[in-house]
């Protein structure tokens, strides 16, 4: 079971927190400037739509958080 407090945390990650999580996953150069929680996947991952800078503007990508045994991991 995921507690209400943990659920609140997993659905309110900031762009900075997601940047840290994705870098911990090995994507060392990635930086997000915006993040919005969009829902849970069928595989119980927490899905965020993140924006990142590109030449001439910004682009977006989905980032997926997996919560298991008290640990959060991120991936694309």
Image (cartoon, rainbow, N blue to C red):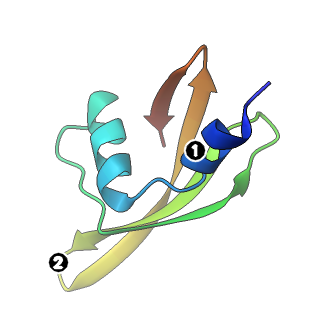
Q: Position of residue 23 (x, y in %)?
A: 26, 37
Q: Which residue is mark 1?
A: 10
- Label 2, label 1: how many angstroms apart (C-alpha)? 30 Å
Depth check, front residue: 29 or 1 = 1
The answer to whether 53 appears left or right of 44 in the picture is: left
Where on the picture, by quarter, is residue 27?
A: top left
Residue 28: horizontal and vertical position, in percent?
A: 19, 38
Q: Residue at x 17, y 46 (%)?
A: 29
Name the residue: 77% across, 33% down: 43
Relative placement, left or right, of 38 versus 50 is right
- Name the secondary structure under disc 1: helix
- 5 sits left or right of 25 in the view: right
Tell me if I can see residue 26 in this picture: no
Q: Nearer the viewer, mark 2 or mark 1?
A: 1
Q: What number is the disc on residue 36?
A: none
| Secondary structure under the numbered disc 2 in the rendered image | loop
Q: Which residue is mark 2?
A: 55
Give the mark nearer the N terminus: 2 vs 1: 1
Total number of numbered discs in the rendering: 2
Identified at 35% across, 60% down, the residue is 15
């Amino acid at each position: 079971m995921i507690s209400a407090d943990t659920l609140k945390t997993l659905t309110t990650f900031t762009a900075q927190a997601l940047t840290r999580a994705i870098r911990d996953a090995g994507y060392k150069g990635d930086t997000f400037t915006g993040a919005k929680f969009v829902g849970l996947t069928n595989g119980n991952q927490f899905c965020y739509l993140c924006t990142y800078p590109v030449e001439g503007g910004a682009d977006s990508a989905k980032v997926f958080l997996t919560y298991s045994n008290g640990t959060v991991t991120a991936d694309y």
